[in-house]
Image (spheres, rainbow, N blue to C red):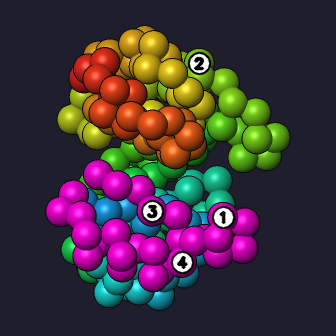
Amino acid sequence: AVSVLTEPTRFGGSLDDLRRAVACCALPILRKDFLVRPEQVGESATAGASAVLLIARCLPGPLLAELAAAARGCGLDALVECHDEADLERALALPDAAIGINNRDLDTLRVDRGVVLRLSPRVPPDRVVVAESGYDDPEQLRPLAGRVDAVLIGSALMRGGDAAAFARPEVRR
């Protein structure tokens, strides 16, 4: 899949970026943004997204479940991002959601690649698990073998010249 940042203020993204990615790529497209309203999920579907990122830490109370239901209603997959056990429990309560485990603490922006290794065993084997943040070198993917289904890699691919070479170490759960 291709992850497209659409957040304009901090990341300079837009829905037009998403539309362009959809127009030129046959892979599924994830809208990566701070979604907080069901209308944003609907506009993601209208723009051609296949999935939306829902950040558990940013979605208090029943809002996470509401946005996941909105995604399902629009025919989109939801990738629910977690950083700690409390986030993970909320994400696991959503039966259709893929589980993203973010090594980056959004409060401090520090990265600890041990987060994925610590939380991934708590995810049932029938759920999709995506490791997120902090992978700068293909060798760092090796400990993920057998633990996750996918890795969300952004900055390292943008800085590097050969995305295929980065992804060569097979990481299968």
Q: Which of marks 3 and 4 is nearer the N terminus?
A: 3
> The disc labelled 4 sits on which kind of residue?
Ser
Crowdedness near tag 1: few (<14), some (14–19) or many (≥20) residues, C-alpha within 10 Å: few
Crowdedness near tag 4: few (<14), some (14–19) or many (≥20) residues, C-alpha within 10 Å: some
Residue sitting at the far front = 161
Q: Position of residue 167 (x, y in %)?
A: 33, 29
Instruction: Look at the numbered discs 3 and 1 and tell me whether their residues touch, using CB distance below 8 Å.
Output: no
Q: Which residue is labeled 2 in the image?
A: 114
Which label is found at residue 14?
Answer: 4
Residue 155, visible in the rendered structure = yes
Secondary structure of residue under mark 3: strand
Q: Distance between the residues labelled 1 and 2?
A: 26 Å
Between 103 and 138, which is closer to the camera in this rendering? 138
> Is residue 102 in the magenta section?
no
Q: Earlier in the sequence, mark 3 or mark 2?
A: 3
Q: Where is residue 118 in the image (x, y as percent from the top left)?
A: 53, 19
> The disc labelled 3 sits on which kind of residue?
Val
Magenta region: 1-27
> Is residue 12 in the magenta section?
yes
Q: How far apart are marks 1 and 4 (CA)?
A: 9 Å
> The disc labelled 2 sits on which kind of residue?
Gly
Q: Earlier in the sequence, mark 3 or mark 1?
A: 3
Q: Which residue is labeled 3 in the image?
A: 4
Q: Where is residue 164 in the image (x, y as percent from the top left)?
A: 30, 33
Which label is found at residue 11?
Answer: 1
